[in-house]
Amino acid sequence: MPQFEKRKRKRGEYESMHNNNGTIGYLWMATKEVMVLSNCHGNESVEISRTGKDETKIKLSCPEAIQFYNSPMGGVDLSDQLTSLYEVEKKSMKWCKKVFYELLLTTAVNAWIIYKELKNKPNMPFLSFLVNLSESLISTGR
């Protein structure tokens, strides 16, 4: 089985390999290495804009498949960002409890988004919603 060679890559550098079935694997160096498999993209590259360490915009070459994957990621990144702020994780916690709390927080983020749209409160902070939700659930359980 072919493999990508292990070496240090420059930012924006990528490699690809394909099999006889039309599946292409890409290894692209962003801030970290990114690997993607695709069966609907060719070996074309696109130019994307990223922010450098000194806050300047730089242009990088990127496989079309990775750009296609990243294009709708804004909402997922925001959800991950919000759930990571209020993680409940302890070293002794079993994996099933970790999964439960992760799903609970993701549900709370989704409920917050829906609540803001329905009640027309676009500036309501997530923490305020989380506190109100917790108090409502506690009072319901009594």
Image (cartoon, rainbow, N blue to C red):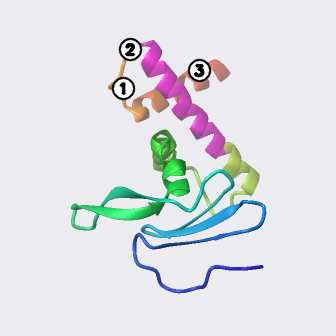
The quadrant of the rendering that contains the C terminus is top right
Could you tell me which residue is drawn at 66 percent across and 63 percent down?
A: 24
N-terminal-most mark, 3 or 1: 1
Q: Disc 1 residue type?
A: Met
Q: Residues within 10 Å of mark 3 (few under 14, many from 20)?
A: few
Q: Is residue 117 magenta?
A: yes
Q: Disc 2 residue type?
A: Asn
Which label number is shown at residue 139? Answer: 3
Picture quadrant of residue 23: bottom right
Which residues are the magenta region? 101-119
N-terminal-most mark, 3 or 2: 2
Q: Nearer the viewer, residue 134 or 36?
A: 36
Magenta stretch secondary structure, dominant: helix
Regarding residue 63, the answer to whether it shows in the image is: yes
Where in the figure is residue 139, as x and y percent of width and height? 59, 20
Tell me the CA gap for discs 3 and 1.
Answer: 22 Å
Q: Which residue is mark 1?
A: 124
Q: Residues within 10 Å of mark 2 (few under 14, many from 20)?
A: few
Q: Is residue 11 magenta?
A: no
Could you tell me which residue is drawn at 45 percent across and 62 percent down?
A: 62
Q: Is residue 107 above or below residue 101?
A: above
Could you tell me which residue is drawn at 63 percent across and 79 percent down?
A: 4
Asked if marks 3 and 1 touch (Cβ < 8 Å), the reply is: no
Which label number is shown at residue 120? Answer: 2
